[in-house]
């Protein structure tokens, strides 16, 4: 059975909140990620938001995450043999499953204690460092690995929870699934998960 890796669950459960800046060098990548996360949180948690809030939250996540780059990295060696149409479908399915899980778990975060620790910027790549606090009081380090796109927007390509790569976990799980079954079976599973 295909399940979300532990790092994926933690990221989805914890990767949302309202900014509480701390004393750190926060640059453009941090500012953009913070603004995106705040918008998702406000939109989805607004009174009476319902499905319209979820749709708007999904649109924000589509701008925040680079589903194609994440999908390519998550499929690893299984990406190259895919046709352009297969790649596009996989990225769409991967994004849909991730968005749905992300949006469904916003209530598990203590938004008032979410912290942005700044970013480490290396040209067109940056790591945005955060600490997320659950409603149960657990603090977890979450890093958003971003890349500046052609329009100058910072887009998330991976998320590390306590230094464990979300995309790396997906790659291991997808490789195992494809090896034991097939790429087509994985796509079928992702289609079912997104319903």
Image: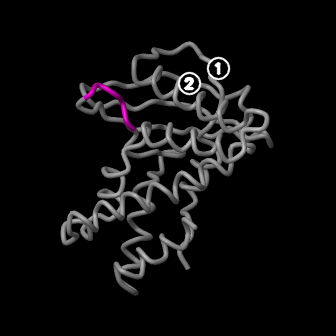
> Is the residue under label 1 in contact with that under label 2 (CB below 8 Å)?
yes
Under circle 2, the secondary element is strand
Task: Determine which of the numbered discs, if any, sits on residue 20 in the image.
Answer: 1
**21 sits left or right of 45 in the view:** left
For the C terminus, give its image quadrant: bottom right
For the N terminus, give its image quadrant: bottom right
Q: Residue at x 41, y 16 (%)?
A: 27
How crowded pointer 2 is (Cα within 10 Å; few <14, some 14-19, many 20+) is rated as: many
Q: Residue at x 67, y 51 (%)?
A: 104
User: How far apart are labels 2 and 1 at the CA level?
Assistant: 7 Å
Give the percent coordinates (x, y) of residue 16.
Answer: 62, 37
The answer to which of 86 and 31 lies nearer the viewer is: 86
Task: Determine which of the numbered discs, if any, sits on residue 116 in the image.
Answer: 2
Most frequent secondary structure within the magenta stretch: loop
The quarter of the picture where residue 123 lies is top left
Give the percent coordinates (x, y) of residue 142.
Answer: 54, 39
**183 sits left or right of 6 in the view:** left
Give the percent coordinates (x, y) of residue 76.
Answer: 28, 64
The quarter of the picture where residue 55 lies is top right
The answer to which of 62 and 155 lies nearer the viewer is: 62
The answer to which of 157 and 121 lies nearer the viewer is: 157
**136 sits left or right of 14 in the view:** right
Q: Residue at x 45, y 61 (%)?
A: 169
Relative to 177, does residue 20 appear above or below in the rendering?
A: above
Give the percent coordinates (x, y) of residue 170.
Answer: 44, 62
Q: Which residues are magenta?
A: 151-155
Under circle 1, the secondary element is strand
Taking the magenta stretch, the answer to whether it contains residue 152 is yes
Relative to 167, does residue 139 appear above or below in the rendering?
A: above
Relative to 83, does residue 65 appear above or below in the rendering?
A: above
Q: Residue at x 60, y 32 (%)?
A: 131
Q: Identify the coloring.
A: one colour
């Amino acid at each position: 059975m295909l399940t979300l890796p532990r790092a994926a669950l933690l990221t989805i459960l914890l990767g949302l909140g309202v900014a509480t800046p701390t004393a750190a060098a926060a640059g453009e990548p941090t500012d953009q990620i913070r603004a995106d996360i705040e918008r998702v949180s406000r939109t989805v948690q607004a009174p009476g938001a319902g499905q319209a809030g979820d749709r708007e939250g999904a649109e924000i996540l589509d701008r925040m995450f680079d589903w194609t780059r994440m999908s390519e990295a998550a499929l690893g060696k299984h990406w190259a043999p895919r046709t352009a149409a297969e790649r596009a479908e996989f990225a769409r399915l991967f994004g849909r499953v991730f968005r749905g899980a992300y949006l469904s778990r916003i209530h598990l975060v203590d938004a008032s204690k979410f912290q942005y620790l700044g970013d480490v910027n290396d040209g067109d790549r940056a790591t945005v460092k955060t600490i997320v606090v659950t409603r149960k009081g657990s603090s977890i380090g979450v890093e958003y690995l971003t890349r500046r796109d052609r329009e100058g927007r910072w887009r998330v390509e991976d998320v590390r929870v306590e230094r464990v790569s979300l995309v790396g976990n997906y790659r291991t799980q997808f490789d195992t699934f494809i090896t034991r079954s097939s790429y087509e079976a994985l796509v079928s599973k992702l289609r079912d998960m997104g319903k």
